[in-house]
Amino acid sequence: MGERIHVEESALNELKSALETAGNGYKRELARLTALIEEITSGHIQGDPAEDLLAKYKAKEDDFKSLAKAIDDAEEYAGVKGTSFTDMITELKQRAK
């Protein structure tokens, strides 16, 4: 229990930045895919490839949403969306004194 873990603040900030970049990229691409699916379901895009894409999307839709939720949760914890990360760093600095 009394074990200490040393992590450089700069490394944590790099991790936070990477999480934010990857999360934003995923959500941007998911929004593009969702817009395409809406075009298919509205009938603006038709044909066998569109129907195939729609079927594949529907089969994985819950996975896409779950991953987006996991990214949101990780961003919130890391401080991209909240203060948990900053609070953790402050707490770690206080413990180190």
Image (cartoon, rainbow, N blue to C red):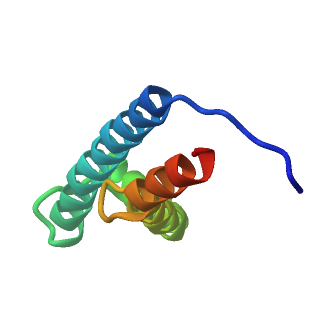
User: Could you tell whether 51 is left or right of 3 in the image?
Assistant: left
The image quadrant of residue 38 is bottom left
Foreground pick, 74 / 10: 10
- Seen at 51% across and 47% down, the residue is 93
| Looking at the image, residue 65 lies above or below residue 29 | below
Where does the image place residue 46, in percent across and percent down from the top left?
21, 57
Where does the image place residue 67, in percent across and percent down from the top left?
50, 59
> Which residue is at the far front?
97
- Seen at 52% across and 58% down, the residue is 91
User: Could you tell whether 83 is left or right of 38 in the image?
Assistant: right
Foreground pick, 36 / 63: 63
- Seen at 31% across and 37% down, the residue is 21
- Seen at 15% across and 72% down, the residue is 42
User: Could you tell whether 94 is left or right of 5 in the image?
Assistant: left
Q: Split into 4 quadrants, where in the image is the C terminus? A: top right
Where does the image place residue 13, in percent across and percent down from the top left?
39, 35
Foreground pick, 35 / 81: 81
Q: Split into 4 quadrants, where in the image is the N terminus? A: bottom right
> Which residue is at the far left?
44
Where does the image place residue 39, in percent across and percent down from the top left?
15, 62
